[in-house]
Image (cartoon, grey):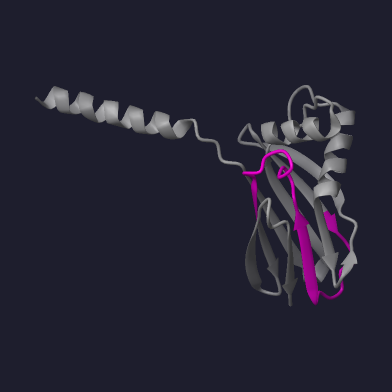
Amino acid sequence: MRNKLNYFFLAAVFVLSSGFGFHKFYVGVFQVNYAEEKKMLQITSRIFIDDLNNAMEKKYHKKTFVGTDKETPADLDLLKKYLSEHFAIKVNGQSKIITFLSKEVEAGDVLVCYSRIKDIDKIKTLEISNSLLVDWNSEQQNITHISAFGTKKSVLFTESSRKEVLKY
């Protein structure tokens, strides 16, 4: 009887885990920190590599290999272009240039990108536009955490909500 109970338990775990194992989440996580002493916004983006390459391939009609062993300098240029077209920040109503600094692969399937905006003296309003991967997949959600002046705010960007204005 105990053996049958063990087999039932294992079968139930297998069925439940396999049912959930095929569901894919389409989420990007972004962190925007205002470093007041450095007068800059520091931006960290975490995006699934396969989703990013699929989105860039759809947009630019070119196979890309960002974050893989096959990555080329042209792939990196397209990544920078894609990021600049789909992630923007306005400070006090003025568009700011986001400088891409570097990238690394995390956990084998996540691309972490580091960027910054320099020369930010005061922030009254911060407008963030984030549509990364949304044009490729309408289920994409981009969670963006913003830390400034000792406060933390989080914003969810989706297909229907691509822009948010924060007041300080």
Q: Is residue 139 left or right of residue 116?
A: left
* Front position in the image: 148 or 51: 51
**Can you tell which quarter of the image residue 42 is in?**
bottom right
Q: Is residue 127 magenta?
A: yes
Q: Is residue 78 left or right of residue 136?
A: right
Residue placed at 89% from the left, 30% from the top?
A: 74
Above or below: residue 109 compared with residue 139: above
Above or below: residue 88 compared with residue 93: above
Residue placed at 66% from the left, 43% from the top?
A: 138
Q: Which residues are magenta?
A: 116-143
* Front position in the image: 150 or 13: 13
Q: Residue 15 appears at what percent x and percent y?
A: 34, 28
Magenta stretch secondary structure, dominant: loop
**Can you tell which quarter of the image residue 164 is in?**
bottom right
**Can you tell which quarter of the image residue 165 is in?**
bottom right
Q: Residue 35 appears at what percent x and percent y?
A: 77, 66
Q: Is residue 122 left or right of residue 139?
A: right
Q: Residue 157 appears at what percent x and percent y?
A: 67, 55
* Front position in the image: 25 or 69: 25
- Looking at the image, the residue that sits furthest to the left is 1
Residue placed at 75% from the left, 23% from the top?
A: 69
Q: Residue 114 appears at what percent x and percent y?
A: 77, 48
